[in-house]
Amino acid sequence: MRLVLVFLVVLTFKSYSQGESPLDFTHLAATIKPDSDRSVSGTVHYSFLVKGKATSIAFDAVDMEFSNFYLGNTKLEKGINYDGKVLQLAVDLAEGNHQIQFDFYAKPKQTVYFMGWGDKVKDNEQIWTQGQGKYTSHWLPSFDTMTEKFEFDLSVQVPPEYQVVANGVLKRQNTTDELTTWEFDMDRPMSSYLAAFVVGHFEKKVIHSSSGVPIELYYTPGDSTKVEPTYRYTKAIFDFFEAEIGVPYPWQIYKQVPVQDFLYAGMENTSCTVFSNQYVIDSTAFIDKNYVNINAHELAHQWFGNLVTEFSGDHHWLHEGFATYYAYLAEKELFGDTHFYWRLYQTAKTLANLSENGDGEALTDPNANSLTFYEKGALALVMLRERVGDTAFRNGIKSYLKNYAFKNAMIADFIREMAIAADEDLSDYRKEWLESEKFPWEQVKSYFEKKEPSLKQFFELKEVVGNAPETTPEALQLFNSETPVPLKRQFILEFHQKIPEASLADIITTGELEVRQAVALTIPKVTKDLQDEFEAMLEDQSYVTQETVLYKLWEVFPENRMTYLDRLEGTTGLPNKNIRLLWLTLSLITPEYQPDNKKEFYDALNDYTAPRYNFEIRLQAFKYLFLIRALSNTALENLIQASESPVWQFKKASRKLLKTINTTEEGKEQLRNLRQQLTTHQLGILNKVLAK
Ligand SMILES: [Zn+2]
């Protein structure tokens, strides 16, 4: 998967020991009925092979009820044990093929998420699942271990007005008794954590890879103009991966579905990637926030993770390091070498700093943070390829994927394949890059110097400018149209305080969008000398630049506030509505601006805290409203609801804000008065949050 807050999240996975089970599950046919009361019921029909003899069958299944057990055609009446987590069936089984079937009912507390079912908004209802880290056994009797792989054929029953997206190809759609059954078919095995379904109102655009694989791009009605910028380069990435990896895409079809309030950026369920609708963008947003990297990352997992799956969390590099690496390769293919090396430099620098401070982590540590698994993991592959050469690297990858296809692998298995392909002993590589907590910065730096002239130039400039009080005219000569944009941008981000104001004005006037944005972001206070240049940037085709410049100009030039606000009236901005929210906030606190519309602005800003909006929008609305002391009682109730969100970073931020509000005099007073109107449930949450 791809996490949104890469630097904060710590992933932990259970470690599994591979028991010598005599059972080998080969096929599941499951019928699932998710209901608007947040329950999931259904029937599972498992086929399995017994090697030797077996006396029991066990499934992971959390808080479920069961009925109608059949072993083949025989109804099971006894030997059924359940402790709330594991369902154990005592049965004598002879060698050979067997089948077991039963019904189940669950009200999952996690793993299945119902969005938009409680509100009055039409057609925003969605149901989606997240297996990895949350365990599919909350909605489907299955296996928490990643080593039990079998073919999943899911059928999902919903009212006819909904669409269903799930693993595999849609074989049939059947409507009876006011329910439509969507029957999906897979033809290859996978682990349970990759099972998924999504229910909602969707439309789709179907394209095909050059090799003929259907690729379905889903979107919600009304977002049809965003399909192109959102899914830009999808076919190019798919074709590039098939050529680069050298092993055909392993599944029958590929689908991508954006959903509301997704827990992460994206999740690579087999043939059915689910991602956050915050990546559904228009063309202007593309420069600041786009889906390209997530798109490539989740697709790469279809080989690295889904086709070949890690044995346990000890081998997590084989998933995240590889998906991150191949996503960077896709960006290299699309945006060029300079883009690629500068991307790598950004994370290498962060990793080097952490390592220097003694906070480095080994890639073999199952409790390492995501920065290690994703970014150090990707750099480890970059340096491995540099060491063994392109041909050996590609051959090693190919034989690894072929030899472990539809199975599980360990890091040692991958290194062995690579060592054979390279005809080289890689134990020193393994020690330095996988087992050591240190980050070999000097090695990486020389690699950058060798590969990318603009990075070499940057390292040299750093030596000169870093110790000088001001940039020299020679150094500033880099601001010309020949210099790669990432070098100019990085130079501004690091040395803006040393650049004379007159030069900054020139840089804004002649610079590319990203270079201008770097100036907008870094200058703490706009001076009179830069006013014209900043005002011009209000028109830049970047929502981040527009937002930054609007605020900075509004702050320093009160006499022009009305003009600035007029310029961005009606602009929404990124999917998180960055400009709209800032505009409403500033309009509210600028007394002379549209005085008759203040109530409307106040209502609109408070309305953005409602659960029907994405959590990124809600969080920013909460923050602005608190800042200008304009939280309505309804917004406070929404904040109480938000402090129970399944999206952990939103939950955490909401709780923190509630507590902060409670430390101010007026906040405390407002909460005291609000208590009279709250339901018992809301009161319970509020008391719980404030007590901690
Ligand atoms: Zn991932």
Image (cartoon, rainbow, N blue to C red):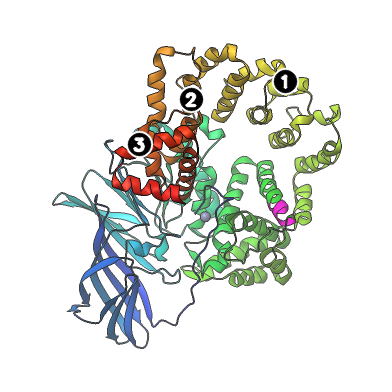
Question: How many neighbours does mark 1 have within 10 angstroms: few (below 14), some (14-19), or many (20 or more)?
Answer: some
Indicate yes or no whether the magenta region holds residue 426: no
Does the image show residue 466?
yes
Q: Which of marks 3 and 2 is nearer the N terminus?
A: 2
Dot 1 corresponds to which residue?
Answer: 505
> Label 1 near label 3: C-beta < 8 Å?
no
Dot 2 corresponds to which residue?
Answer: 585
Question: Who's the residue at 59% across and 45% down the image?
Answer: 331
Which three-letter amino acid code belongs to the residue tagged 1?
Ala
Q: How far apart are marks 3 and 2 (CA)?
A: 24 Å
Question: How many neighbours does mark 3 have within 10 angstroms: few (below 14), some (14-19), or many (20 or more)?
Answer: some
Q: Where residue 365 sits: x, y (%)?
A: 61, 66
Chain part drawn in magenta: 351-356
Question: Who's the residue at 36% across and 33% down the image?
Answer: 633
Question: Who's the residue at 68% across and 28% down the image?
Answer: 524
> Label 2 near label 3: C-beta < 8 Å?
no
Of marks 3 and 1, the one in the foreground: 3
Q: Where residue 392 sits: x, y (%)?
A: 67, 63
Question: How many neighbours does mark 2 have within 10 angstroms: few (below 14), some (14-19), or many (20 or more)?
Answer: many
Q: Distance between the residues labelled 1 and 2?
A: 29 Å
Depicted 632 relative to depicted 210: above or below: above
